[in-house]
Image (cartoon, helix red, strand yellow):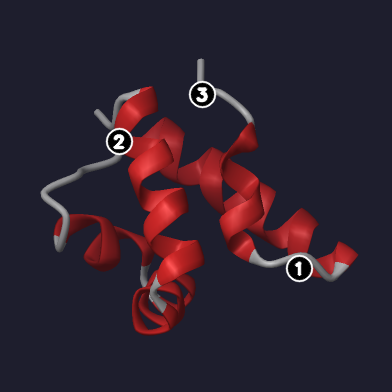
Amino acid sequence: MATEAELKKIGIKSIEDDSFRKLFKADPVKAAATLGITFTPEQLAELKKRRDVLEKAGLRESKMFGYPYT
C-alpha cells in the first residue's frame, strides 16, 4: 500500500522527470515500482479514475496527487 508520503514522492518525480512522467502515464504500476512503491487495487482504481478525469480537463497527471487517498 502506497502511503501518502509515497504518493507525494510520485507526484514530485512526475513533475521533475519527463521520462518518469511518460512511464507513469503508460504504466503507473511499473513506474511506482521503480521507486519501490506498490499500490493496493483500490489505490490503483482511484488513480486511474483521477487520471482520466484530469486528462479530460487537460491537466497533467502529476497534478492528481493533491488529494489524499483514504
Distance (Cα) linking label 1 and label 2? 22 Å
Disc 3 marks which amino acid? Tyr
Disc 1 marks which amino acid? Glu
Determine whether the residue tagged by mark 1 lies in a helix, strand or loop: helix
Asked which quadrant contains residue 2, the reply is top left
Q: Is residue 53 left or right of residue 18?
A: right
Q: Quadrant of the N terminus?
A: top left
Q: Residues within 10 Å of mark 3 (few under 14, many from 20)?
A: few
Total labels drawn? 3
Q: Earlier in the sequence, mark 1 or mark 2?
A: 2
Residue at position x 44%, y 81% in the image: 18
As drawn, 67 above or below 57: above
Residue at position x 39%, y 74% in the image: 17
Q: Position of residue 13 (x, y in %)?
A: 37, 60
Mark number displayed over residue 6 = 2
Determine whether the residue tagged by mark 2 lies in a helix, strand or loop: helix
Q: Position of residue 54 (x, y in %)?
A: 76, 58
Q: Is residue 65 left or right of residue 18?
A: right
Residue denoted by label 1:
55
Distance (Cα) linking label 3 and label 2? 11 Å
As drawn, 45 above or below 13: above
Q: Are marks 1 and 3 in contact (CB under 8 Å)?
A: no
Q: Are marks 3 and 2 in contact (CB under 8 Å)?
A: no
Distance (Cα) linking label 1 and label 3? 19 Å
Q: Residues within 10 Å of mark 2 (few under 14, many from 20)?
A: some
Q: Earlier in the sequence, mark 3 or mark 2?
A: 2
Compare residues 5 and 30 and report the one nearer the observer: 5
Disc 2 marks which amino acid? Glu
Residue denoted by label 3:
69
Residue at position x 43%, y 52% in the image: 12
